[in-house]
Image (cartoon, grey):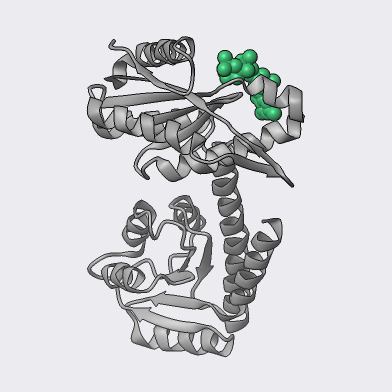
């Protein structure tokens, strides 16, 4: 994983030498001068004559960097920068102002708007390519940090042993459902607990117990529809969060989860196959009575245990 990540970074660093740069300036003569300097530096150049054209060009082909004039007709540089930053798909493109507005106050105002750098016209080709190169290198670093943040956020919602969602992943999903469907969203909660799991550990050792949990997670994940969420609730307990499922669907899915575990013995080592069963309890409720739904599904699970295990039980709220 770390290897893959650094390989990708290396590839994007290589691309720094040959970036696609959008020049935005209402003067054709200035665009021509800038194009020559940047193409000499090995870059590919696109052009736009005002802010509006620049936005359209960015949406058509995301550039690696935008060189932006300030004073232009139709839409000026500051307005174009604001529009770029407000658009999720374009917000991370580095922008360098290149302008004849050169007082200290104007430079400060340009940077405050969120530009990466501010160049004064006229700009020597050597300075232009050096500043562009520096901004591109910073972009590579930032992109890499952003990817790492996304990846570590993803990993913190995943159970390390089984690869399914952990309690944090579960909470994130619950909040997503709350945001998209509101507190009245119907959901079914299915609790699954391995039967006599302690004796698996006691008889075959903890590492075989771990392997059983991993194989179970694979079987359960295959059975749970993609729109639902399988969670390792803790220890040898799993939960399925199934929004918008009616009682018949919940009973059917619960039984399918029970059946997939005991369908065939689990191969946990050379010549070692274990018959494993689970007990399942489910309950339905609204998203805003979530604690009650969990407690009810838990009570149903213990009904299934007391009734002899390897079975499904339910309780009404
Ligand atoms: P029941 O049928 O009543 O559910 O019995 P049980 O033995 O499954 O339940 P109990 O709660 O007594 O034991 C659960 C065991 O699960 C105890 C604990 O050591 C074990 N366990 C919890 N997490 C893990 C884990 O990550 N790996 C392994 N190998 N064992 C675990
Ligand atoms: Mg158990
Ligand atoms: Mg348990």
Residue sitting nearer the eye, 3 or 199: 199
Which image quadrant shows ligand 2? top right
Quarter of the picture containing the C terminus is top left
Q: Residue at left 47%, top 50%?
A: 112
From the top left corner, tell me how far across and down residue 315 is, in percent.
32, 12
From the top left corner, tell me how far across and down residue 277 is, in percent.
53, 28
The answer to whether residue 243 of the structure is visible from this angle is no
Q: Is residue 174 left or right of residue 56?
A: right
Name above or below for residue 234 compared with residue 64: above
**Please, which residue is most extreme toward the front here?**
271
Q: Is residue 68 left or right of residue 248?
A: right
Q: Residue at left 50%, top 90%?
A: 36
From the top left corner, tell me how far across and down residue 163 is, in percent.
57, 42
From the top left corner, tell me how far across and down residue 130 is, in percent.
63, 75
The answer to whether residue 154 of the structure is visible from this angle is yes
Name above or below for residue 41 compared with residue 68: below
Name which quarter of the figure residue 177 lies in: top left
Name which quarter of the figure residue 188 lies in: top left
Q: Residue at left 49%, top 55%?
A: 111
Name above or below for residue 238 compared with residue 158: above
Q: Residue at left 36%, top 59%?
A: 84
Quarter of the picture containing the N terminus is bottom right
């Amino acid at each position: 994983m770390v290897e893959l990540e650094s390989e990708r970074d290396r590839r994007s660093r290589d691309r720094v030498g040959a970036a696609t740069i959008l020049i935005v300036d209402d003067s054709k003569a200035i665009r021509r001068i800038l194009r020559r300097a940047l193409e000499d530096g090995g870059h590919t150049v696109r052009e736009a004559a005002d802010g509006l054209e620049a936005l359209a060009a960015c949406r058509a082909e995301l550039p690696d960097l935008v060189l932006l004039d300030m004073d232009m007709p139709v839409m000026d540089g500051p307005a174009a920068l604001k529009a770029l930053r407000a658009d999720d798909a374009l917000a991370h493109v580095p922008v360098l102002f290149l302008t004849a507005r050169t007082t200290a106050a104007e430079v400060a105002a340009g940077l405050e708007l969120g530009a990466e750098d501010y160049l004064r016209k006229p700009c020597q080709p050597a300075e232009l390519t050096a500043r562009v190169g520096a901004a591109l290198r910073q972009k590579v670093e930032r992109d890499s940090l952003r990817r790492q943040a996304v990846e570590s956020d993803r990993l913190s919602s995943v159970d390390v042993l089984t690869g399914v969602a952990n309690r944090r992943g579960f909470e994130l999903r619950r909040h997503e459902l709350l945001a998209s469907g509101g507190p009245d969203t119907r959901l079914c909660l299915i609790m699954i607990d391995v039967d006599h799991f302690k004796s698996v550990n006691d008889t075959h050792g903890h590492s075989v117990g771990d392997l059983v949990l991993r194989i179970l997670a694979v079987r359960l994940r295959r059975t749970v529809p993609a729109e639902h969420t399988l969670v390792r609730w803790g220890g040898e307990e799993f939960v399925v969060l199934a929004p918008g499922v009616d009682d018949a669907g919940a009973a059917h899915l619960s039984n399918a989860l029970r059946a997939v575990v005991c369908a065939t013995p689990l191969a946990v080592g050379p010549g070692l196959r274990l018959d494993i069963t689970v007990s399942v309890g489910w309950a339905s409720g609204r998203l805003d009575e979530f604690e009650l739904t969990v407690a009810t599904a838990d009570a149903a699970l213990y009904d299934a245990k007391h009734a002899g295990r390897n079975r499904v039980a339910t309780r009404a709220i």
